[in-house]
Amino acid sequence: MDTVQESHAVERQHSRSRLVLIGFLAVAAFFLFSEHRAHFLGILPYLLLLACPLMHFFHHGHHGHKNSGGTTPETAAPNEASVPPGEKS
């Protein structure tokens, strides 16, 4: 029975520590943003402009194209299995 009570005490201590850490991080983030807001907002347009070529570079070619041979399914030669049995030439 003592081990159950001790485990509950440890859990309460961990939850208090997490709450204190979250509170400290929230206060630190608030002061960091409020003191450096001018710097952050001044560089924001440049970050948006930089995001465009970076997204194009990293996402280019990932539009669901599976074949890299330059042929599309419309221009590729049909397989024997895809032709109905009565229409073989």
Image (cartoon, helix red, strand yellow):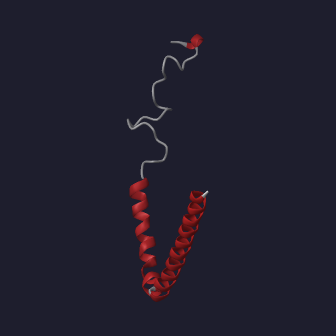
Q: Nearer the viewer, residue 13 or 23?
A: 13
Residue lying farthest front? 2
- Seen in the picture, residue 39 relative to 56 is either above or below; the reply is below
How many tags in the picture?
Answer: 0
In the depicted structure, whether residue 10 falls above or below residue 31:
above
Nearest the camera: 21 or 69?
A: 21
The residue located at (42%, 73%) in the rendering is 47
Give percent across and percent down for residue 39: 42, 85
* Residue at image location 38% in from the left, 35% down from the top: 69
Task: Please name the residue shown 46% across and 41% down the image.
Answer: 65
- Residue 45, picture quadrant: bottom left
Q: How far across and down, in percent of the image, does residue 48 sit?
A: 45, 71
- Residue nearest the viewer, comparing 17 with 65: 17
Q: For this view, does 46 lie left or right of residue 22?
A: left
Q: Position of residue 6 (x, y in %)?
A: 56, 62
Q: Quadrant of the N terminus?
A: bottom right
Task: Point out residue 87 in the picture as x, y percentages from the top left corner.
Answer: 57, 13
Quadrant of the image occupied by residue 36: bottom left
